[in-house]
Amino acid sequence: MVLADPRLPDASAWALDPDLAYLNHGGFGATPLVVLQAQREWRAAMERNPTGFLVRELPELLEAARNRAAAFLGADPKGVVFVDNATTGTQTVIAQVRLVAGDEVLTTDHCYPAVLAQLNRAVAAAGAHLRVAPVRLPAQSTASVCEAVLSGLSKRTRLVVVDHVASCSGLVFPLEEIVTHCRGRGIPVLVDGAHAAGMLPVDLAGLGADFWVGNMHKWVCAPKASAVLHVAPQWRDALRPLVASHGLTLGYQPAFDWTGTHDPTAILAVPAALDFFDSAGWPRVRQHNNELARRGAELVAGRIGTSYPHVDALAAGMRLVPLATPLSEADARAMETRLLEKHRVVVPVTNHDGWRWLRVSAQLYNTVEDYERLADALTGTR
Ligand SMILES: Cc1ncc(COP(=O)(O)O)c(C=O)c1O
């Protein structure tokens, strides 16, 4: 039983519509009121003197936010830059990996659609080949997932792109083993960590991946358009933003610091989001979310007559509920719409080997009643 923990913030700390059972934290995160307030204060400071703020104050403020994010991610601060979102981060890396005809890039069939599109475009332009390793669901063990990924490597593999936590499945990939193996063979690894920061303890220095991209707006609950790109030392002289910037020739971080006028307040509010969870205690938050996600998924599956063998080492705050029968994409979208409009439940139907999964998330604002409402809606008892 996941009991409400009085030491943890609850739904009253968020701006979410109280009428909704919001089970899609993984989609876009959701930002606590105090963090939105911090962002408003940064915006007010910027608008009092835009030139003074953006030209004089921002460099130091950015550095402070970057150092804070780096400490949280166990990263060398010199390797961290901010980008707007994970899609921009992965594209930045994929566009700059040198591929030639005959090369291979390896990813898995859990890869996020935008990242897959980036990879398809890159291999097509180079005459290279994209291998997509199947990682079957339900995943059985760390060893079987490693084996499924690594068996796709070949002598021609020039890049491996692997999720930290996959969108379609919530699967937590055993990255340490995968990265260590690839590094041993001299193959660079790009980790799509869109969901990892906040959901899992992250130690980028220990992990040693060549490139890691993660959103701060999802499980750190920072405002939207705050993502981190972390690059290992050996790539920092080479990797530059997609948009040539004022600082392009000044080095890795200066090149990313100012890529044209934008609103930096989401990034500047990252420390406020970290403060919010620091005071609750990250281990307690993660334990709550993992347990609630598992219990919620089991509750819904039990009520609709399906089951899923959850392996806790391979999952965290987002879990799958198998549908009794796979849907067409149109029917999956119709189910999402019906759940929202008729039952006020927000939950995605996801596609891995068919549109056959509900992906339920758990964040501090969720309660068991949210999953019960979903189960009631699916079984027609509501
Ligand atoms: C695994 C994964 N990668 C990349 C992304 C893209 O994130 P963004 O929309 O912030 O670019 C997502 C978004 O949900 C994701 O789940």
Image (cartoon, helix red, strand yellow):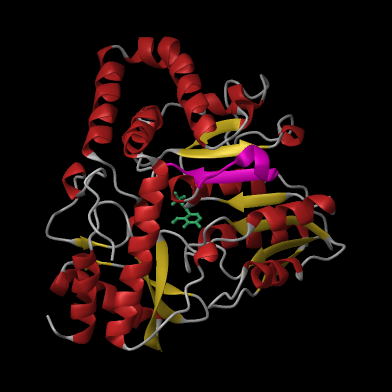
Residue 77: image quadrant is top right
Q: Is residue 225 magenta?
A: no
In the image, taking residue 23 as reference, residue 104 lies left or right, namely: right
Between residues 2 and 30, which one lies in front from this camera angle?
A: 2
Tell me if residue 156 comes above or below residue 40 in the rendering.
below
**Residue 227 location (% of width, % of height):** 47, 40
**Residue 349 location (% of width, % of height):** 37, 73
Q: Total marks drawn?
A: 0
Q: What residue span does the magenta drawing correspond to?
A: 201-216
* Image quarter (top left, top right, bottom left or bottom right) of the C terminus: bottom left
Q: Is residue 203 magenta?
A: yes
**Residue 337 location (% of width, % of height):** 24, 72
Residue 220: in sight, yes or no?
yes
* Image quarter (top left, top right, bottom left or bottom right) of the N terminus: bottom left
What residue lies at 15% left-to-right and 72% top-to-bottom? Answer: 343
**Residue 56 location (% of width, % of height):** 43, 9
Taking the view exactly as shown, the residue that stands out farthest to the right is 155
Between residues 201 and 268, which one lies in front from this camera angle?
A: 201
Tell me if residue 296 comes above or below residue 206 in the rendering.
below
Residue 303: image quadrant is bottom left
In the image, taking residue 238 as reference, residue 292 lies left or right, namely: left
In the image, taking residue 258 as reference, residue 38 lies left or right, namely: left
Residue 361: in sight, yes or no?
no
Residue 363: image quadrant is bottom left
